[in-house]
Image (cartoon, rainbow, N blue to C red):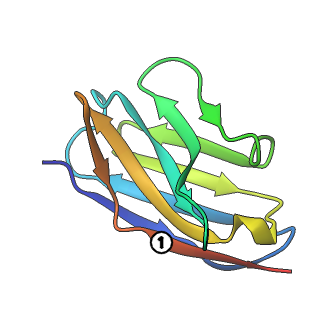
Amino acid sequence: QVQLVESGGGLGQAGGSLRLSCAASGSIFSFNSMGWYRHPPGKQRELVAAIPRSGTTNYADSVKGRFTVSRDNAKNTVSLQMNSLKPEDTAVYYCYALVIGTMYWGQGTQVTVSS
């Protein structure tokens, strides 16, 4: 069983920055993929950024050049640095981990960006 605990988020201003972190129980070295989804109000959940165990990261077009996902295998964490925030980034953000075909989710953290 994998447990994911998110931190960070909260209220940000347009043009500002916020950072989300996700701590996983156990070693993440073998996790196939980790990253972040978000669920904007009134919309469907969408993938924001994914970082595989090896290979290149993937970003939603809407966040490319503004958000950066990273993982620290030694600390068992994955982070999302969000710069140049926009009001449309307002959403509940969920950390995920894909482990041998099973998706695990964090509890979600609210990010609200004011204009």
Residue 15 shown left or right of residue 57 in the figure: right
Q: Which residue is drawn at 51% across and 52% down?
A: 37
Residue 49 shown left or right of residue 65 in the figure: left
Per the image, the residue denoted by label 1 is 109
Residue 84's spot in the image, x, y percent?
A: 83, 60
Residue extending farthest to the left is 1
Residue 52's spot in the image, x, y percent?
A: 46, 27
Q: What is the crowding at mark 1: few (fewer than 14 residues within 10 Å), some, or many (at least 20)?
A: many
Residue 111's spot in the image, x, y percent?
A: 61, 73
Number of dots carrying numbers: 1
When the figure is inspected, residue 100 is found, relative to residue 23, above or below; the finding is above
Quadrant location of the C terminus?
A: bottom right
Q: Which residue is drawn at 32% across and 36% down?
A: 98
Residue 94 shown left or right of residue 26 in the figure: right
Provide the secondary structure element on which disc 1 rests: strand
Residue type at mark 1: give it.
Thr
Inspect this view and state whether residue 96 appears. yes
Residue 85 figure quarter: bottom right
Q: Residue at x 76, y 47 (%)?
A: 62
Inspect this view and state whether residue 17 appears. no
Q: Which residue is drawn at 38% across and 48% down?
A: 96
Residue 113's spot in the image, x, y percent?
A: 74, 76
When the figure is inspected, residue 88 is found, relative to residue 115, above or below; the finding is above
Residue 42 shown left or right of residue 23 in the figure: right
When the figure is inspected, residue 112 is found, relative to residue 33, above or below; the finding is below
